[in-house]
Structure formats: C-alpha cells, structure tokens
Image: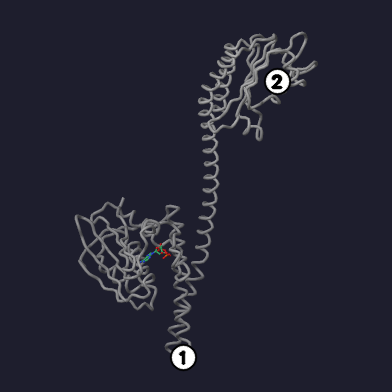
Amino acid sequence: MSQDLDLQSIIQKVTDASLQLSGADFGILFYDLPARSIQREHLFALSTNSSDVQDHLEDITGFQTLITDQVIRLTTRQELTKYNSKIFGDGNAARSEGWIVQSFMSVPITSKSGETIGCLMLGHGQEGIFTKEAEEMVLGVVSQATVALDNAMLFEKLVSANEEKERLLEKATEQNFRKDEFLSIASHELKTPVTSMKGYLQILEKQVSKEGNGGYLPLIQKANKQVNKVIHLVNDLLNLSKLEAGKLQYNFSDFKISEVLADCIANIKNAEYKHNIRVFGDQNSVIRGDRNRIEQVIINLIDNAIKYSPDATEVLIGLSEDRGYFKLEVRDFGPGIPEEKLQLIFERYYRGEENSYKTSGLGLGLYISGEIIKRHQGRMGVESEQGKGSTFWFVIPLDQDPE
Ligand code: ADP
C-alpha cells in the first residue's frame, strides 16, 4: 500500500543516515512494533556499507530479540558476548566466515505517547567504533525522524479507519436496502386484505344499522376505527417505499385550497375526535400542486394536532398568502415539543418517546409530508412552546413550475 511505502521509505532513510553518521557496517531498523506483532510482520529496513556484510548477516529477524527501550552502546567483543551470547557468541547469527560484530549500538524509537514503537540497531566488525558523539548523532536523527514517522503512522491509521468506515457504511447500506425491500413487499401484501376488510365492515355497519341490531353497532364501529388505523400505517409504509424508490407520482393541477381543506376535515380518520377545528384566513387561494398529496399533508398535520393534544378541545387552521407564497398553519393546544426535538421530528421513523406507547404511528408522517412539500418547492416547519402547544406550517410558491 502506498502509505506503507511512505513509512518504508522513511525508515530506510533513517537507517541509511544513521549508518553514515556513525560509520557502522550495518544498520537494522524495526518499526511499528506493537501493532504489527499481532497482525503482520514488523516493518524493517536494512542498510549496509557493503554487500559482503549483508551476506554475513545470516538471520536479520533474529535481531528482533534485541529490541529494547534503552539506549545500548557496546564497544568490545567481551561486552557483546556478555550482553547476548546467543546473537553475539560463537556460532551465532551475527557471525560468519571471519566477520563478526564487535561494536553494537541500539537506539529505541519512542512515540509521542512514550511507547516504544521501533528500534534502530547499528553494528561494526571492529571494536571501539561507536563513540559517545556517534550515539548522540544517531539519537538526533532518530528523534527528528520520530515526528515524520508519527505522522506517517497517523496517516496509515486514518486510512485504515476510513476503510473500516467505508466497509461499515457499505454493510449498513446493504442492510437498509434489504429492509426497504421488505417494507415495500410487506406493505403491498397488507394493503389488499386490509382494504377489503374495511369494505366488508362498512357493508356490515350499514346492514346492522338498517336492521336495527343496535348492540353490535358500537363493536363494528370500533373494529372500523382500528382497521382505519391499520390502513393509515400501511399507507405510510407504502408511501415511504415509493418515496425511497422515487416512485411517488405527482399529478399537478390548479385547485382551491379551501375545497381540499373541507375534504380533509371531513376525512379525518379519527371519527371520534372531540376537537373543534376552526379555519381562519384567506379561503380563496388557488394553488398549483398535487391535490391528493397536499391533502395527505394537511390530513397528517390535523391528525397529529388532534392525536397529540388529547386534553385540548381546539385545533386552528390558518391560511394566508405572502409574497408569492401560500402558507398553511395548523395550531394545537397540546403539551408542545421540547426544543431539542424540533429538528428530529421530521426525520424518518422518529417518534417522541412520550407518545410511542399512547398513540399509534410509525414516525413517518412528518417525514413523508416534508418530502411532498419539498417536491412542491416549498418548506415545512414548526414552532412550539412547551405547555402551550405547537404550530406546524408549510409554504409553497403560488406560481410554480411542476418540473
Ligand atoms: P407519528 O405520528 O406516526 O409518530 P409523525 O412523523 O407524524 O409520526 O410525527 C413524529 C413525532 O413528532 C411524533 O411521534 C410526535 O412525537 C411528534 N409530533 C408530531 N406532531 C405533533 C404535535 N402536533 N404535537 C406534539 N408532538 C408532535
């Protein structure tokens, strides 16, 4: 990988420079010790002043056992053998055919956080080569290189974190796709039986009220109400999957908003609501849009206003025009919405936790409404004061190009 090459070229340069400064026969640098010992081999660089020496170093990786977090400087054969007889004693890795390491220096590479992340080792075939000055020069090179190595390492970590992020994102997208597909199939499959159930219940309701078996009528009406709720949920799901697939169709036409509003109020599913819905403002506005979709948005807002203000008795609807825009507001006198939730409620699947067990819903209504209004080149929003109620609104341009 290219970031490995960056690290590799830095450690090679450090090893080469140290070799030259100290006059060593060979230099070996091991790098990225903690991370690579688990997953892969250490990065390492080797530098020698002649190909002969390289041939003599039989097993470079054997030097890994000499990695230390102390500076070591050994200048006699005796010291070396005492320090590590396995590596430096007779018949060892660093000895071969007349050439033998007789001077040795090892400098740890320490990260900013104080962790030993590498080790530079220098060796020579004669005694007394590495002076105190040479040690200081090498320490200087290493400390300067540490900054560059830290940066290169950080970059590598960032790249792999990014790769991990991308992998997770891909997985989440795939899971989302499956979920959307499931929702689309499930809602399609549910729609037909539920709609015919509603049809049968309506026939039954008519029949029972005609024949006068009053005892069953309230039960049938209750069943009808529950079926309406299911239809509402299924419709939300269907709309969502169409929206996500870009298949929500729009048929634009000019229509009088007061007529749509009258239909909405008549259609509000919750037939038992006790709220008085009052309409204010300019009833003559004619807007261009998809009549059914705008109706869907208004029903959603009125429905929520009723649903989320069970102790109130009024819902107010305001209509107005301003600077080429039509505005509709739905005001309720419910508990209101906490400020930190005001943005969240327009998100897909978001439901206020305080409502989730009291009211039915999937947290899709406002999301779908918002998307419909966007498609009309408009905006949707809410103002709310806790304890006083909420006002949901949307604006759309009066004269818009449907495309
Ligand atoms: P649902 O009603 O299915 O939960 P919505 O998208 O219509 O989905 O609404 C999302 C959330 O916004 C609701 O769960 C509720 O917490 C909050 N909300 C919507 N309208 C109102 C309202 N008029 N008053 C208080 N909270 C509301």
Q: Secondary structure at mark 1?
A: loop
Which residue type carries mark 2?
Answer: Ile
- Give the quarter the ligand 1 occupies: bottom left
Q: Residue at 26% across / 73% down in the picture?
A: 278
The amino acid type, in three-letter code, at marker 1 is: Asn
Q: Nearer the viewer, residue 39 or 30?
A: 30
Task: Using the image, tell me which numbered label, if any, was put on residue 213.
Answer: 1
Identify the residue at image location x=53%, y=62%: 186
The residue at 56%/32% (across/down) is 114
Where does residue 87 sit, x and y in percent of width and height? 75, 20
Q: Is mark 1 within 8 Å of ligand 1?
A: no
In the rendered structure, find residue 7 and report the number of the disc placed on it.
none
Task: Give percent across and percent down for residue 163.
Answer: 54, 38
Left or right of residue 321, residue 16 in this image: right
User: Label 2 belongs to which residue?
Assistant: 60
Task: Say whether residue 400 is left or right of residue 233.
Answer: left
